[in-house]
Image: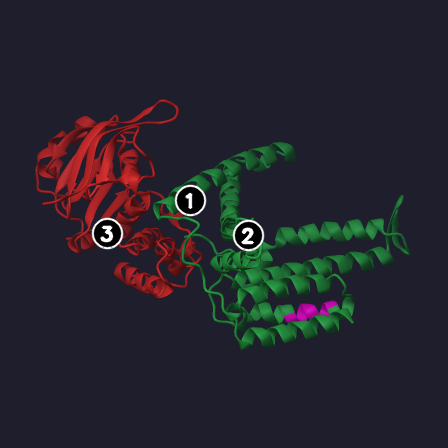
């Protein structure tokens, strides 16, 4: 049996699950943009709101922390780069390199904003079926008749749908290589090559099989799409998000 | 009895020049349970892929109820549901019910009819309690039953199984076998490609043996059991000991 992966739709009945996907997309964009204008007090409010939202959607927190461990590493790199590169009052000095107070502050703010974007993206992916994303993208692209909306929308929904599978394939490839002692090879280029090539082959083979499976079930651009409908709940949520963004920006 | 499948002088040559099928002539009557046996590379899967137009003949014709498969691929794929060897690769949806809905949605059925078909198909394979679950978390047997539900929702006349018991445990094999027999009793025509006949031979009413892309034997299973090993197929244990082969479900 496969392990759960936090990246992907988790069925549920939370309020966020029930929101119209077009509103959720709008919230994703607006809150992400607002976070770029926020500092410690507003970032704290945003973090609190998003944490409550994620817990409400039924996010398996322990698993999320495990799945995002590499993202935390990336954030750490960003934080270190900022704290070392921004000029200001030195806090620690080692040879020619100095960590500055301003650098530490800016590093923290940048990482915090990135975390906010990740959290809101996660709450979107957790609560939205890829078929709903497809329907929303089609709706957004409708005013542009020269763009093949259905095809683009389906490609986007497939990307979202198959991110967890790519992770699963990567995990299987890594396990197979560890079983054959790849850890004793210290050259990172060699390890990357030995990991990347079979992983890409697996992903393309999987994609080929998927195409066959879709063709066998009569896939075409013209199909029954998800119904998009907004209700009072969505408009109330919109007012709430607008107020939150105003508080953050002002 | 009426023939639901008529294959006339079918040959298939792959792009690299390899001969996949060589002058196949075969008629399958409606409601029959046919096992196509042969070692790996004998052409079983290639033959099955011609039944719903996933592969098209280099020479010859495949007809479903008198109409050429190549003339109307959508009709062919709706009439012939195919369960692939790797059930994982057949999964398209994010939840069990989304996956079953994929086929009916491709047939452009209205939303109410899609829902009705999904509920009926999940009930038939006994997966209605898992409808909101992620498909990748199902067991091997459940995944294959999900694949069956996915094609049943398209209301096919013929069900084609490619190595249905590969990498499955004993309870999983029994579940799938019971499902196949129940579908046969419900009036579906069943075609199964397999290299191990142990579980199938007691239920089949016809056995077709393939070798090197051609049909080398075609008849009643009881009459062909003694010849199986000549063609690289393992003879069922009971038959080796001169006894009657019984169902695994007894």
Report whether mark 3 lies on the same chain as mark 1. no
Q: Is residue A83 left or right of residue B162?
A: right
Q: Is residue B226 left or right of residue A56?
A: left
Label 3: which secondary element: helix
Q: Which chain is green?
A: A
Q: Which residue is mark 3?
A: B174
Residue at 77 percent across and 59 percent down: it is A108
Q: Residue A74 location in percent, x, y?
A: 69, 50
Q: Is B148 or A146 nearer to us in this picture? A: A146
Compared with residue A167, is residue A120 higher up or lower down, i.e. above or below? below
The chain holding disc 2 is: A
Q: Which residue is mark 1?
A: A210
The magenta stretch spans residue A45: yes
Between the C-alphas of marks 2 and 1, the distance is: 29 Å
Residue range corresponding to the magenta coloring: A43-49
The chain holding disc 1 is: A
Q: Is residue B163 left or right of residue A24?
A: left
Q: Which chain is red?
A: B
Depth-wise, is mark 3 or mark 1 nearer the camera? 1
Q: Does the image show residue B215?
A: yes
Number of other residues with Cα within 10 Å of mark 2, as a class: few under 14, some 14 to 19, many 20 or more: few
Residue at 61 percent across and 55 percent down: it is A68
Q: Which residue is mark 2?
A: A145
Report whether mark 2 lies on the same chain as mark 3. no
Between the C-alphas of marks 3 and 1, the distance is: 27 Å
Q: In terms of image quadrants, where is residue B120?
A: bottom left
Residue at 51 percent across and 51 percent down: it is A164
Q: Residue B143 location in percent, x, y?
A: 35, 52
């Amino acid at each position: 049996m496969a392990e759960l992966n936090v990246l992907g739709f988790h069925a549920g009945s939370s309020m966020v699950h029930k929101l119209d996907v077009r509103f959720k997309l709008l919230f994703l964009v607006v809150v992400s943009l607002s976070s770029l204008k926020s500092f410690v007090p507003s970032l704290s409010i945003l973090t609190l709101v998003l944490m409550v939202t994620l817990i409400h959607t039924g996010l398996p927190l322990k698993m999320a922390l495990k799945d995002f461990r590499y993202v935390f590493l990336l954030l750490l790199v960003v934080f270190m780069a900022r704290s070392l590169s921004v000029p200001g009052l030195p806090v620690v000095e080692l040879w020619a390199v100095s960590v500055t107070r301003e650098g530490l502050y800016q590093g923290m703010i940048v990482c915090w904003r990135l975390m906010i974007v990740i959290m809101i993206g996660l709450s979107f992916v957790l609560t939205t079926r890829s078929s709903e994303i497809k329907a929303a993208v089609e709706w957004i692209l409708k005013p542009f008749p020269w763009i093949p909306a259905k095809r683009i929308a389906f490609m986007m929904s497939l990307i979202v749908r198959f991110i967890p599978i790519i992770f699963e394939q990567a995990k299987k490839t890594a396990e197979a290589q560890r079983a054959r002692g790849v850890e004793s090879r210290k050259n990172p280029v060699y390890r990357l090559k030995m990991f990347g090539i079979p992983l890409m082959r697996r992903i393309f083979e999987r994609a080929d099989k998927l195409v066959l499976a879709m063709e066998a079930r009569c896939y075409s651009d013209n199909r029954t799409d998800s119904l998009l409908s907004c209700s009072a709940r969505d408009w109330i949520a919109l007012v709430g998000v607008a107020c939150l963004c105003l508080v953050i920006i002002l | 009895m009426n023939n639901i499948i008529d294959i006339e002088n079918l040959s298939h040559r792959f792009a690299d020049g390899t001969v996949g099928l060589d002058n196949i002539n075969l008629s399958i009557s409606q409601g029959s349970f046919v096992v196509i046996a042969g070692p790996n590379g004998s052409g079983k899967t290639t033959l099955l892929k011609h039944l719903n137009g996933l592969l098209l003949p280099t020479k010859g014709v495949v007809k479903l109820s008198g109409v050429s498969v190549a003339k109307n691929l959508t009709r062919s794929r709706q009439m012939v549901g195919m369960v692939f060897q790797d059930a994982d690769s057949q999964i398209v949806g994010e939840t069990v019910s989304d996956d079953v809905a994929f086929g009916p949605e491709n047939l452009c059925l209205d939303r109410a009819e899609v829902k009705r078909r999904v509920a009926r198909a999940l009930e038939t394979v006994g997966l209605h309690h898992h409808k909101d679950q992620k498909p990748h978390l199902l067991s091997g047997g459940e995944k294959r039953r999900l694949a069956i539900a996915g094609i049943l929702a398209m209301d096919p006349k013929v069900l084609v199984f490619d190595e249905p018991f590969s990498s499955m445990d004993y309870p999983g094999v029994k579940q799938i076998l019971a499902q196949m027999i129940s579908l046969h009793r419900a009036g579906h025509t069943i075609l199964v490609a397999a290299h191990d006949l142990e579980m199938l031979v007691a239920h089949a009413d016809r056995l077709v043996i393939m070798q090197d892309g051609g049909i080398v034997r075609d008849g009643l299973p009881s009459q062909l059991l003694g010849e199986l090993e000549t063609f690289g197929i393992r003879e069922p244990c009971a038959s080796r000991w001169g006894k009657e082969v019984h169902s695994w479900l007894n």
